[in-house]
Amino acid sequence: MLNRVFTDQLQLGLGQSAAAALLAFAVVLLARGRKVHLEGEAAVALVRGLVQIIAVGSVLVVLLRGPRWTGAFLLGAMILAAGAISTKRAKGIPGSYLVSTYSIACGAGSVIAIMTWLGVIDTAITSLIPVGSMLIANAMNTNGLVLNRFHSDVLAHVGEIETALALGASPRQSIAPYIQTSFETSLIPAIDSLRSLGIVWIPGLMAGMLLSGSRPIYAAIYQFVVLTMIFAASGLTSLVSTMLIRKHVFTSADQLLLRPGFSHKLSE
Amino acid sequence: MPDLPVVLRTDHLTRSVGDRRLVDNITVEIRSGEFLAVVGSSGSGKSSFLRLLNRLDEPTAGTVLLEGVDYRQIPPCELRRKVGMVTQRAFLFPGTVHENLGFGPRQRGEELSVALAQELLTRVGLPGYLSRDVANLSGGEAQRISIARALANTPTVLLLDEPTSALDEASKIGVEDLIHSIIRERSLTCVMVTHDVAQAARMATGVMMLEGGRVIKAGSVKEVLHA
Ligand SMILES: Nc1ncnc2c1ncn2[C@@H]1O[C@H](COP(=O)(O)OP(=O)(O)O)[C@@H](O)[C@H]1O
Ligand SMILES: [Mg+2]
């Protein structure tokens, strides 16, 4: 329908964005009917997403002709941004920006580095950037999930945690159950996408590869490769994140800092 | 009891949050076997004071001496083994009674023997509860288990924060009697927070009354409560 109205591809893209946004808006209205207010955050996220992707798309057009190191530079910038974004999901956890950025850099960065070195990810910017950014984005989501879950679990179990400390447990022991559930929860999306690969969804990358003339079976196998890398990057991110965050919620005298209505700054 | 050794001494102990003083310059000596009740209205800083004694919170000024040693020189886990705590609500860990009782020793790589665990359970009036799931305990039973769990660490000082105030009337008396007799037979040094002045009079040897984080009265039960 839209492709008959718009003959120019850029216009078509904008028309398609408007259609998708309308649908999203309808969902927001539905949520509003149930007293869930998403409109503010959703509107900002939609506009922001559109502007960002157009900007990055334009930059990519230029960079794609540039030297290969620009790919690494771009991925580095993405990691910093991902750290900042997932920090927002961990409000109230002291030091969460550093923890997030470091975890994503370790999780996604090391998988990208190893896989590029092995030749699993091609160094051409056209493949390094899409695959790399997918790994970073998933590492970011995992990190957001793990911190969010950890934050709410700790706040809901302050009594148990302090009881454990009062019985002589180390900080590590006292929060071990919550670290474990946070870790497991954060990996559900990565595991579920692997499990449902090809049945519930066929990632966009495969469509792209098919369009650009890869052998279908190779394109299919590569989807598995990508999702497995996502799983590895997510798992590593979550591991690093839970390891680092532990140090930030206790003082050096093994006192729990993360307590309801308690500002961590005051107790330093 | 002036001849008995001082076990716990707070030295100008203070904790401020922002510009509020939750605990304000408290200096007190607790001798071996003494039972100090900390009384005062709600929000007067009783729990805040108690939490400083096992260093769950950090003093912003002053310190605590445990058997003459500044407690900042003692590793927190070791300090908390010696200075045990029982809170208003028993926060039992998911699992069996035995697992809960063994929690403290396990932190030091020790296993609480079945015999010792059973002895503790008998002492708190719950023989035969060893392999029960803690999810199915009543409030009074849970509190008894949490007392036994604290005792499994063989503390020298026991801190109690309103240990009976969350219980119903019937279990309240039982748990109070239990605490009282255990403390006497083990000659534990004890600091108990309570808003119940009658309870303080029944159990304590000394009383300290707080208001706005400060000590407004301190002395023997007779001096403070019957004056
Ligand atoms: N972490 C904290 N930050 C700020 N204020 C606190 C904190 N903990 C307790 N308070 C305040 O300190 C006061 C004393 O609290 P608390 O020691 O719990 O009193 P009590 O046990 O005597 O009822 C209360 O007014 C309480 O609101
Ligand atoms: Mg209190």
Image (spheres, rainbow, N blue to C red):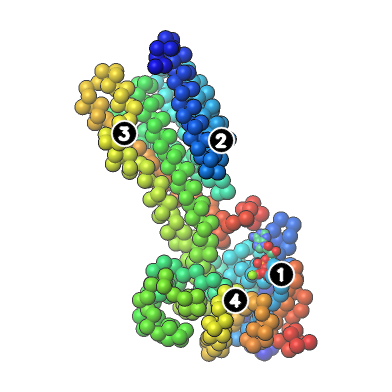
Give me the residue at 56% from left, 72% from top. Answer: B87
> How far separated are the C-alphas under marks 1 and 4?
17 Å
> How far separated are the C-alphas under marks 3 and 2?
28 Å
Front: mark 2 or 4: 2
Residue indicated by mark 1: B44
Residue indicated by mark 4: B165
Asked if B27 appears above or below A103 in the picture, the reply is: below
Between A145 and A196, the one nearer to me in the picture:
A196
Residue indicated by mark 3: A201
> How far separated are the C-alphas under marks 4 and 3?
56 Å
Residue indicated by mark 2: A39
- The answer to whether the residue labelled 3 contacts the one labelled 2, judged by CB atoms less than 8 Å apart, is no
Give me the chain letter of mark 1: B
Give me the residue at 42% from left, 86% from top. Answer: B122
Closer to the chain start, of discs 1 and 4, is: 1
From the Cβ of disc 1, is ligand 1 less than 8 Å away?
yes
Residues indicated by labels 2 and 4 sit on the same polypeptide chain: no
Tag 1 secondary structure: loop
Q: Residues within 10 Å of mark 4 (few under 14, many from 20)?
A: some
> How far separated are the C-alphas under marks 3 and 1?
60 Å
